[in-house]
Image (cartoon, rainbow, N blue to C red):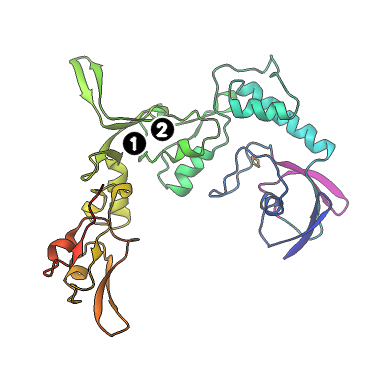
Amino acid sequence: MVNLTIDGKKISAADGETLLQVARDNGIQIPTLCSNDGLEPYGACRLCVVEVQNGSMVTLETACTYPAAEGIKVRTDAPDVIKARKLVLGLHLARCPNVKLIKELAAQYGIEKPAEHLRMENEYCILCGLCVRACNEVVQAGAISFCGSGKDKRVDSPFGLEAEDCIGCSSCAFVCPTGIIKVRDIEKATEQMPAGEVEIGPERIIENWNRNLKLRTCKDSNNAYAPEFMLNRFCKTMDLPDQFFDISPSYREFPVVDEDLCVGCGACSDECPVGAIQLRERENKEVRSNILTTHCCGCRTCTMYCVRSAIKVPEIA
Ligand code: FES
C-alpha cells in the first residue's frame, strides 16, 4: 500500500494503481477521453492531466498512466491543470468541431469555438486509439491500426482496403467516444452491380473498415444475429462444436431435467457436445442429471438421447 493525498484528501492506494483509478475509487472525478477500464492505459488524449508534487518537484502528468506513489500530493483542479485541459480541449475542438462530446466538454471549460486557424472540417476521430486497442487487446483480431503521421494520422484498415481480420464484433464502435464508427446490420437490401441489381443480406456492414460480413440466422427465432466469420472463429479458438451458435444466445431456452423421470443413466452427459451436463448425487443418494446453463449451447442433443424423455425444452412464447 502507498499513502498519498489527492486534493488535500489523505488516501491509501494499492501498489500499481493509477492516479485515475485511485481518484475515482475515492469519488474524485477526472475527465477522460481515451481511458477504458477494460484496456491498458494509453495516455493519448491528455485530458486527464493532474498536478503531481513529488518532493520538491511539481509536474503535470496524465492521471491514467501515472502510478500512485508514496507521499505524492496530487491536485486535480490546480490553475495549471485547468489551463492544460483548456489547451487540450481547444485542440480537440479544432480537430473535431462537430463532435457533440467534445463540444460539451469544451463548453464546460469555457471554450465555445475552435481556433479558426486550426479548425478541421469533417473530422470525427480524436485519435484516442480506443478502437485499435480494443481490437488488439480484447478481441485479438488486430484488424485496424494507426497509419499516416502528423495531420494525416488516422485509424484505418490495412492499406485502406477491406480489413480481412475484422470479425465484425463491433467492439470498435462500442468503445468509440465520438460515434464515428458505424456498424449497420441489414436484413435484406438490393445493390446495383455492373451485371444488374443483386440482393444482399442479411449482412453486417462496417464501412469504416470496408468490411461486409454475412450474418448467421438463429434456427429458433429466424433472426440474423451475428457474423458467421466471428462465430466460426469463436468455435475454433474455444474448441466449441459447430452447432454451438445455431441458436442465438438471447433465444436459447435451456433444457430442464424432470428429476422424477431421470434415472441418472448418464446418456445425456455422454452425448452433450459441450460438456454441459453433469451427474449429481442428491441427498437421498440417487443420481440425477444436472444441466449447467453456463455451458449449454441449446442444441437439444440431450433430449434426443434421453430414453426416459426426462429432458424437456420449455416452449418459447
Ligand atoms: S484519459 Fe488519460 S490521456 Fe486520455
Nearer to the camera, 186 or 13 = 186
Q: Point out residue 312 in the picture as x, y percentages from the top left corner.
A: 20, 61
Looking at the image, is mark 1 or mark 2 nearer the viewer? 1
Q: What is the number of the mark on residue 158?
A: 2
User: Taking the image as drawn, is residue 248 in sight?
Assistant: yes
Q: Amino acid at mark 1?
A: Glu
**Residue 14, picture quadrant:** bottom right
Picture quadrant of ligand 1: top right
User: Which residue is at a point 22% across and 68% down the rendered structure image?
Assistant: 258
Dot 1 lies on which element? Answer: loop
Mark 1 vs ligand 1: CB under 8 Å? no
User: Is residue 92 visible to the viewer in this orientation of the structure?
Assistant: no
The magenta-colored residue range is 48-67
In the picture, residue 127 is in which quadrant?
Answer: top right
Magenta-drawn stretch, dominant element (helix, strand or loop) = strand
| Residue 248 screen position, x and y as percent | 29, 47
- Labels 1 & 2 near each other (Cβ < 8 A): yes
Q: Which mark is residue 164?
A: 1
289 to 171, vertically: above or below: below
Residue 314, image x, y percentages: 24, 56
| Crowdedness near tag 2: few (<14), some (14–19) or many (≥20) residues, C-alpha within 10 Å | some
Locate the N terminus and report the quarter of the image it occupies.
Answer: bottom right
Vertical relation: 213 (above or below) 278:
above
User: Which residue sits furthest left?
Assistant: 307
